[in-house]
Image (cartoon, coloured by chain):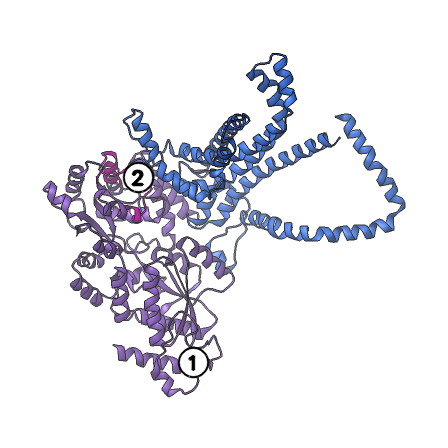
Amino acid sequence: MQLRMRMASIGAVAVLVAACGGSASTTAPGASTGTTALPSAPAASAPAVVAATSITEWDYQSADPQMTQWQKVLDECTASTGVTIKRQAIPRDELINKVLLAAQNKQLPNVLRVDNPDLQQIADTGALAPLTDYGVDLTGLYKNLIDAGTYKSKVYGIAPGINGMALFYNKDMFTAAGLKPPTTWAELTADAKALTKNGVYGMAFSAPATEEGSWQFEPWLWGAGGDLSKLDSPEAVKALQFWTDLVKSGSASKSVVQWTQGDVNDQFVAGKAAMQQNGVWNLSALEKSKINFGIVPIPAPDGGAAPGPMGGEVLTIPVNTDAAASAAAGKVVNCLLSDKEMAEWATLQAYIPSRETVAAQAAAADPNMAPFVTAAAAERSRTGPPANLGPNYSKVSQPLWTAIQAALSGAKSPQDALTAAQKAAAAALAGG
Amino acid sequence: MTRVVEAGAAKTAAPASQQHRRLPRLRSEQIVGLLFLLPALVYVTALYAYPIVFNVVMSLEHYTLKTFVTGEAPFVGLDNFDHLVNHPEFWPAVTNTVWFVVGSLFFQFTLGLAIAIFYQHKFPLNGILRALILIPWLAPVLVSGAIWVRLLDQDYGVVNFAIHSLGYSGQISWLTDPNLSLISVLIANIWIGIPFNMVILYGGLQAIPRVLYEAASIDGANAWQRFRYITWPLLRPVSTVVLLLGLVYTLKVFDVIMSITRGGPADTSQILNTWAYSLAFTNGFNFGLGAAAGDILLVIVLGFGLLYLRYAYRELRETTT
């Protein structure tokens, strides 16, 4: 593998030298982002001048440990491809503003990392280039990931790792109460009720007025047989009724409408929640904590695992007049998608590697990771089938999270809330 | 009053007739004057007029995410306003805004005035305590917001703990009850606004001559009468300024709500301002619609701003003549 990468990078440098004669955005080796180590092999064949193209990269992993974890694989890809990467880690809330301004001024970065449900919307603007134009290799990747990145039958975004959710339970609390982790909704309701006492809530989840709320609700919606194309279906009402009952009965805190997933995990780590619905990325922190936890899939109403939404941030190559830089961006994306970098970063970040063979190895190495890997293949892209909302996902997601908030806070019944949501979504979709 | 106006008119009439005779000299003076005006003009145009005009233009266009890339923003006339007014969240946001503004102004003013009057009395540590009251005003709003989120937490919050220890056994969901969320952000905003009211009103109180109170005491006026017939009328100019400024400040409140409830749950604490933001940035990036909501806010603030200027101008004339 290592050798293949080296060979590829020699080719890359040779092509670049031929294509632009080093006139484009070349910089001195090691001018930025930490690494000074450049591959020695290409230098031997091209004496004196090393044509190291430099590219820009933006992502929203602006907080540690994720910030340094991502930097590590970027540095390694600089070393193996010879492309200097000028990275900017921008807080998530600010990234979209910055991207919009950059798009207006035609100054988008060469590699842009965005949350996967936003991809379609950005691709729809025409700001992105198809990844295959720059030789990005998609073989062996999860099909749902490719679905999420596909807009009008071209792939615009791809991720080295994906994420998903499961039910984390506190083993000590379950043992003390003589309970088994739930496999159906009825069991979950009963367990949550039995475990709610002394300031501990049986269940914790997150339903804020952001995409996080819709994302957390989707496994229940899809598990019940509902779908994003009809928010007021009986199945959708059943799912929201289930969540509402958990809050109404006191098995889950009323504060769920405010909690982010980070808050939910804090509750779980502090021993204030016996179960939590949360993402795989919490594994590394949970494994370091004192909590004795187990993981089961989020159940469908009558047993079996519910399909969850696929999470993760995808790498894109925005349209750029500097063809050499875009070609270099392609090399970097390929490097990040290589088995080695993918495995390393996914382990650091506690993500599921997006190539099935690599994911299988990760599952074998870490038993906590195994249930997430098992669930990964069944995960759905939020923008993809069956609703196929594409760039319109947020027009449905926003009314959905508003309905969830209305039902959980008691402002409306689940039926009324979802009827209003379906009306609002239909109006938003019709409005273009 | 009318005499003042006449006198003013006579004064301005005199130089006008002189101006006619010495036209050339004044013109060069005017050029110099314009040059002095230029920096201010450039500043106002670039930083105020341009963004406002841009916002108004944007509100008449179908301005979306795509516009940033392609530059195409089709003109749609008043479509955005039509959408806006018929939006199910429009009237709730308007009603919330009215309650939020009226509630904030009333309590900020009355509590601020009460505290200002209290500090009129001389007592030990008066200065230090008065300085401490300023803290809500000096603390960054996001910090205050984070503190209020903690205080009002239904499970671990200090407010609920205090209510419990008073004997009430229920659990008040300050931030997650749709009937209470607006009240919660209102309480936080009142708390933040009291110091501003107190400081200005305190200054106003200090300017009222002591002798009036002494004279009133000799005449046998009680505390209420002294307030009603001396403090209140003499404080009126200051009160008006405080209320008008408070109104404009409250209409532009954004951070208080965003840091405490984000307009939730289910938009029950959304005011026009935060709603405009959510239309543009979280609900499908419809910038035209968000700009239209911004326009409405702009007209209201502008209206009250002009009212304030007219009032300030009148006050100025009254005090200078």
Q: Residue lying farthest front?
A: B124
SS at circle 1 = loop
Display colour for chain B:
blue
| Above-or-below relation of A22 to A235 | below
Chain letter of the purple region: A
Spatial separation of the CA atoms under disc 1 and disc 2: 56 Å
Q: Is residue A386 magenta?
A: no
Q: Is residue A248 magenta?
A: yes
Query: What subunit carries mark 2?
Result: A
| Above-or-below relation of A81 to B316 | below
Q: Residue lying farthest top?
A: B220
Q: Tell me whether marks 1 and 2 sit on the same chain.
A: yes
Residue at mark 2: A255
Q: Is residue A158 visible?
A: no
Q: Relative to the observer, which residue lies in front, A368 or A382?
A: A368
Residue at mark 1: A51
Q: Where is residue A5 drawn, in percent x and y?
A: 30, 77
Three-letter amino acid code at the position of disc 2: Ser
